[in-house]
Structure formats: structure tokens, C-alpha cells
Image (cartoon, rainbow, N blue to C red):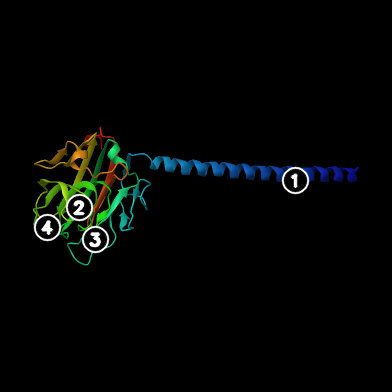
Amino acid sequence: MRNLSKIVLGVVTQATRRAISTEDTTMKVRHSSVLATIIGVLVFSQAAFAQSPFFVDRFTGSSLNVHLQDADSAFRLDWKSIGLSACEPYSPSANRHHITTLRSDYLSSNWTYEITFNTPANAPDDILFIGFGQGEGDSSYFNEPLDSVNFRIHQGENGFWAGWRVDVAAHSLGSGVFTYLETIGYLPPGPEGGIFTARIRKIGSQVSFEILDTSPAISVTIPDITTTAPFLSPFASRIFFGNASCVYSYGDLRVLPASVDSNDR
């Protein structure tokens, strides 16, 4: 009887081990399948999320989010801000770089783009470029944004001796080539700097530019961007920002539907 019990116990034990082994294998397969599905969903979600024209980036992460690119690897992220990594050995400099969106079809949609920029006291003279278009430097004209429409914000200790002037410009290609160039105001003069928010809003062919919360107002509206900047391409119209000096920084970037007002920020 004892021998029979041992035999039965042995058979049951082996059967149990086989069942457990089979179950483990099945569970491993199932886990692998579930993991692959989760990874696929995450990758798909990230890709789908990146395709959205609207996003907010407060630059609190360790890398750019999926909507933005740093083609020259020239920028560094700090807590709630982003700026150029390396300072130029001289000032002013034309060694300009830009952060751009991955999407390149903003000419074909309506949106509100806002970004905050910080000018420290006694900063080296620089021009800050905030706008949309190709978003690459024109090497024939001090690397100002090529085929783009943008703010030209004169900043720094002397503001290029231009009275800390704020322009809106449409530049195609070539030295001094502008299809539109308008001075729309002056930021509070002096080398003390400050924190300001620029807004660009596009509704149909109308595009407005504004530095928020300034008195008098610093703003202009272009009624037909396709006439003012005929070089803009629906396939190469990125939102961007950039400059040359590392002491300037940007934060709180928003690309939202055109109906969004600053009160909703």
C-alpha cells in the first residue's frame, strides 16, 4: 500500500510539475504578448500624440517633447526653461539656432502660439526670433529665419542701439530681402531686461502678432499672409523660436486652437 501510495504520489507530482511548467510557459507567452501590445500602444499613442497640431510645453522634462526638434543640438533644458547651450565668444553674434515643431503644415491650419522669453539684465545684444515658416537660418543674411514670418525682438544691454525695437518681418532668401518689415513698438527701454510673452494667432489668412501686457500695445495684424509672404509653403511651415546668445531663455510654450485667449492660459 505504501509503495502504491508513493507511486500515485509520484505520478501526481510529475503531472503537477508538468501542469505548472505548461502554465508558466503559457503565462510567459501571455505576458510577452501583453507587453508587446502595451509597447505597441505606447508607441502608437506617442506617434499619434505627436501628430496633433496643439500642445503645451513648460520644459520641465529632461528632453524635448515629441512635438519639437533641435536640429543643431544647440539647446539645453533647465527647469521650466530652455536656452542655447554654448555662449558665443563675442557679441553680437549671427550664430543663430532655432527650436522648431516637427509638424510643418501650420500654414494650413488655425492656431494660437504663445511663448515666454526672459532677458536678463545687461545681457549681450541679440535679436530673438519667434514665428513660423521654414525655421532654418539663411546663411546669406546673418542666419535670420529663412522663408519665415516672425518677430525680430531687439534685446540686450544696448538693444543694437535700436531702442529695444520689436519688428515683424517676412524674410525669404538673401541679404536684406523682406517682403514685409514693420516696427510695431518698443519694449520697456533700458538694460534691465524682463520677462515677456509673445503671441502669434492665425485665423485663415489673417495673422496677428502681439507682445502681451504692454503699454502702449505692441501688436500688428497682417490681413493676408499668403500675399504678404508668398514664399511660405504649406509643407514647410513650422512654428519656431531662437536666437544667438545663451543667456536668454524661453518657457511656457503653447500652441492651442485659435479661439484660446490669454485669459484661458
- Mark 1 is surrounded, within 10 Å at the Cα level, by few (under 14), some (14 to 19) or many (20 or more) other residues, namely few
Residues at marks 1 and 2, CA–CA distance in whole angstroms: 70 Å
CA distance separating discs 4 and 1: 81 Å
Q: Position of residue 9 (x, y in %)?
A: 82, 44
Quarter of the figure with the C terminus? top left
For mark 1, what is the residue?
17
| CA distance for labels 2 and 4 | 12 Å
Q: Which residue is mark 4?
A: 160
Label 1 or label 2, whichever comes before in sequence order: 1
CB under 8 Å between callouts 1 and 3? no
| Dot 4 amino acid type | Phe
Amino acid carrying label 1: it is: Arg
Residues at discs 4 and 3 in contact (Cβ within 8 Å): no
Q: Nearer the viewer, residue 38 or 223?
A: 223
Residue denoted by label 2: 128
Q: Nearer the viewer, mark 3 or mark 2?
A: 3
Query: What residue is disc 3 on?
Result: 95
Kind of residue at badge 2: Leu
The secondary element bearing badge 4 is classed as helix
Give the CA separation, mark 1 to mark 3: 69 Å
